[in-house]
Amino acid sequence: MNDPRILPAVHAGDGRPAPAEPPVADDAAVLDAYSRAVVSVVDAAGPAVVGVHLRGASDARGGVGSGVVIAPDGYILTNAHVVEGAARIEVALADGSTSDARLIGVDPPTDLAVIRSHSTGLAHARFGASDRLRPGQLVIAIGNPLGFESSVSTGVVSALGRGLRSRDGRLIENVIQHTAPLNPGNSGGALLDSHGRLVGINTAIIAGAQGIGFAIPGDTAQLVFSQLLAHGRIRRGYLGIAGRTRVLDRRMVRHFDLAGAGAVEALELARDGPALRAGLHSGDLLVALDGRPVGSIDDLFRLLTHLPPGREIPITLIRRNRLLTLPVTTAEEPPR
């Protein structure tokens, strides 16, 4: 007699047993695992996130933002716009204590700044590799939105490689777009991966939108931190050119076999600047720098960011329907 507890196998049309149904995940178990992951990140990295309070700001209103301790001796990353105009900076630590801090350096083109608390022995965040992030990956934001300290929100990476304008008009590249909710006061706070590693510094939202936040990549933040610590500023290449993006005539592009249809028209050349010394003229159309195409002002800024001062490079330009290449030696970008 058949055992009723044994179900007959169901066969496919070719006589083979049908594949077993995949196991159905237990929703509660999945949510519990998600919660444990977020809690462990907050426990590990939360104490490294501080409140940044401005006292005596230039607009007389003061302000509040967030910061991330990245070294136990008090070095803190935050946004340049958070500390802008501050006469005095105070940080509120996760244990409830406060400490004065001094400004080490700012880099408006990346909207990053480094401050240093007078406190030492602080819990600090560890960097992750932001270049390994993938769309859909879990991220956790910790900051002080609207003054509510140590607030946590979660989301996923929406996109990578976004461009975002800094306050001085430069394009910040490779910005991380994510869905972790942000509010005023989150600026300068941490964006963490599921292992609690710092992969970004939250910097902006789009007013009126939901689930669209932006963070400066952790890889960029590490570079800026090291240079601000060493030099008090970022050492970028400088040519002394004020220009605008120009779209070239298609016939000109074909005639000179150019890589793209854009160029930078030189409008003004700084006195005693590298470009003027190299023989550039107002009205020249820059099409390549160090062998790389220059199709816009953003391209020019990006290339100069990665060119150290004092290096001789070729600059290719169009002048009166002639293609010329001139050697130019970059200088260090003057302080703003």
Image (spheres, grey):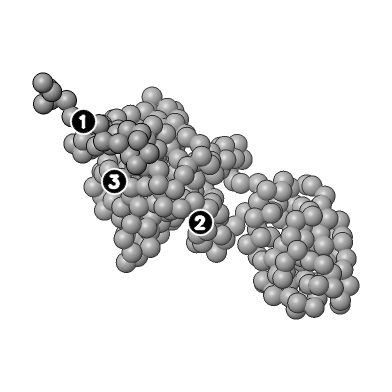
Residue nearer the viewer, 1 or 83: 1
Q: Position of residue 328 (x, y in %)?
A: 83, 56
Above or below: residue 124 compared with residue 113? above
Secondary structure of residue under mark 1: loop
Callout 1 crowding tier (Cα within 10 Å): few <14, some 14–19, many ≥20: few
**Residue positioned most to the front:** 1
Callout 3 crowding tier (Cα within 10 Å): few <14, some 14–19, many ≥20: some
Callout 1–callout 3 Cβ contact below 8 Å: no
Quadrant of the drawing holding the N terminus: top left
What residue sits right under mark 2 in the picture?
162
Q: Is residue 310 left or right of residue 12?
A: right
Query: In the image, what residue occupies the spot 75% across and 52% down?
Result: 331
Q: Position of residue 51 (x, y in %)?
A: 32, 43
Within the image, what quadrant is residue 293 found in? bottom right
Can residue 272 be spotted in the picture?
Answer: no
Q: Earlier in the sequence, mark 3 or mark 2?
A: 3
Query: In the image, what residue occupies the spot 28% across and 46% down?
Result: 153
**Whole-number angstrom distance, CA of label 1 to CA of label 3:** 49 Å
Q: Earlier in the sequence, mark 1 or mark 3?
A: 1
Q: Earlier in the sequence, mark 2 or mark 1?
A: 1
Query: In the image, what residue occupies the spot 45% across and 40% down?
Result: 199
Query: In the image, what residue occupies the spot 30% across and 36% down?
Result: 11
Residue nearer the viewer, 292 or 28: 28
Callout 2–callout 1 Cβ contact below 8 Å: no
What residue sits right under mark 3 in the picture?
153
Secondary structure of residue under mark 3: strand
Within the image, what quadrant is residue 254 found in? bottom right
What residue sits right under mark 1 in the picture?
8
Q: Amino acid at mark 2?
A: Arg
Above or below: residue 318 compared with residue 230? below
**Disc number lying in front (1 or 3):** 1
Can residue 140 be spotted in the picture?
Answer: yes
